[in-house]
Amino acid sequence: LRVIRGVEPRIADAIGAELTDQRESLKLIASENYASPAVLLTMGNWLSDKYAEGTVGHRFYAGCRNVDTVESIAAEHARELFGASHAYVQPHSGIDANLVAFWAVLAQRVEAPALADAGVRHVNDLSEGDWTRLRRALGDQRMLGMSLDAGGHLTHGFRPNISGKMFEQRSYGTDPGTGLLDYAAVRAAAREFRPLILVAGYSAYPRLVDFAAMREIADEVGATLMVDMAHFAGLVAGKVLTGNFDPVPHAHIVTTTTHKSLRGPRGGMVLCDESLAEHVDRGCPMVLGGPLPQVMAAKAVALAEARRPEFRDYAGRVVDNARALGEGLLRRGARPVTGGTDNHLLLLDVSGYGLTGRQAESALLDAGIVTNRNAIPRDPNGAWYTSGVRLGTPALTTRGLDTEGMEEVADLIHTVLAHTTPTATASGAASRARYRIADGVTERVAARAADL
Ligand code: PLP
């Protein structure tokens, strides 16, 4: 920080303040974690200065031998950790990884056959008419993914993301009674809609997904099964999710982030079989800029960490902790959606406390508990105010909290929410953002949280 302070002190201060915030609060954001010092240090070095468009051994710049080493090792760890035949470690983020996967599937399923039909070997050889036909074919594809309010992600075909412009989208939700994924309903939607890509994976679904069942559905309608395991990659790496719940043996293509439960640097990754490999490897320059060698190096370090026995232990504790947190909340009268969790996250319906998700998120933050508001299935408050908060245990588990600690965290969350009331705006109208916490509660909770 001393070196940075000499150049731009405000940035040094912000970094220092972030460290303090992360130390002094309880981080329950389900998509966050604490990367190890080895991972952090691998990102701040001279690899960052190198351009390396292309793939290992096939670069558009000279002098890439060290980047080749780094990228090969990261891909090797990814293949071996997840049992995948091909790994592409260049994507800069989860969104980028998904974009790479979408283009790879389009290239394999639409572009390549359309080119063959037109009797040409390369897009550059297409006539104007062929081009028009190809563009229409590319733009006329369908994607079926989990709805946002059931826990799906924006990149699974929703309008604010490019996937919603590239594909005609339809979504499947969860059963209104149980809150669980209804495979018969997914099958019915797939039969009717006939998507090119069936997307499985989520950001806010607290239960397991049967990927073997999803593959069966995809096969029945001729869809490519893409699983976005961004959230639960650490549980797959740690062998907590195995058999039907491990997406890698079942999906045609798997995407992930590397920074959530996997505990690596911010970034993305694509795993696939050999039939998609050549299309995936064209991610740069199709949709990605030059790779970030320092981040690929940090991915290699994080993946090496995830191959150690300690990581299996960590992944198991993440799930035990989430379950304990859910049970602790349930016992206090709170309402976790589906009644609890099988993975690393909980979705807490806060309407029973008379609050919106926005009010709950703000009140918890005041007490040093960092969460994010999140829509619940069929949420009457929409995606901005919401009726829920999402709680995840990867970060607190990294900090060493156990199930007893989670019981205390459940009590802290319940105490804050039970002592928070909505308030009206100046004009007297009910507000979905304003709230008041009873006197002294914030301080008491923050003091107890500091002891954890
Ligand atoms: N996919 C899923 C399921 C996610 O939850 C997220 C992030 O929250 C992403 C993709 C996007 O990841 P990134 O923010 O790295 O682009």
Image (cartoon, rainbow, N blue to C red):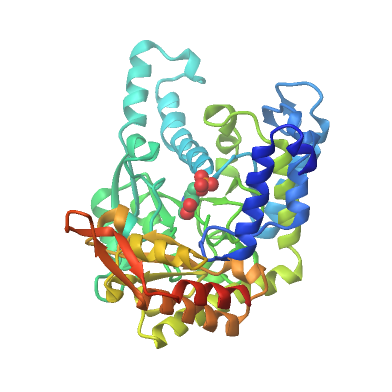
Task: Using the image, determine if residue 20 lies above or below residue 311.
Answer: above
Residue 262 shows in this picture: no
Residue sitting at x 42%, y 57%:
200
- Residue 123 position within the rendered picture, expressed as x and y whole percent measured from the top left: 48, 19
* Image quarter of residue 127: top left
In the drawing, does residue 345 fall left or right of residue 397?
A: left
Quarter of the image with the C terminus is: bottom right
Q: Which of 403 and 245 is in front in this view?
A: 403
Residue sitting at x 79%, y 38%:
3
Residue sitting at x 52%, y 31%:
287
In the drawing, does residue 312 fall left or right of residue 362?
A: right
Task: Using the image, determine if residue 79 lies above or below residue 320.
Answer: above
Task: Using the image, determine if residue 7 lies above or below residue 41.
Answer: above
Q: Nearer the viewer, residue 258 or 243?
A: 258
- Residue 80 position within the rendered picture, expressed as x and y whole percent measured from the top left: 71, 57
Quarter of the image with the N terminus is: top right
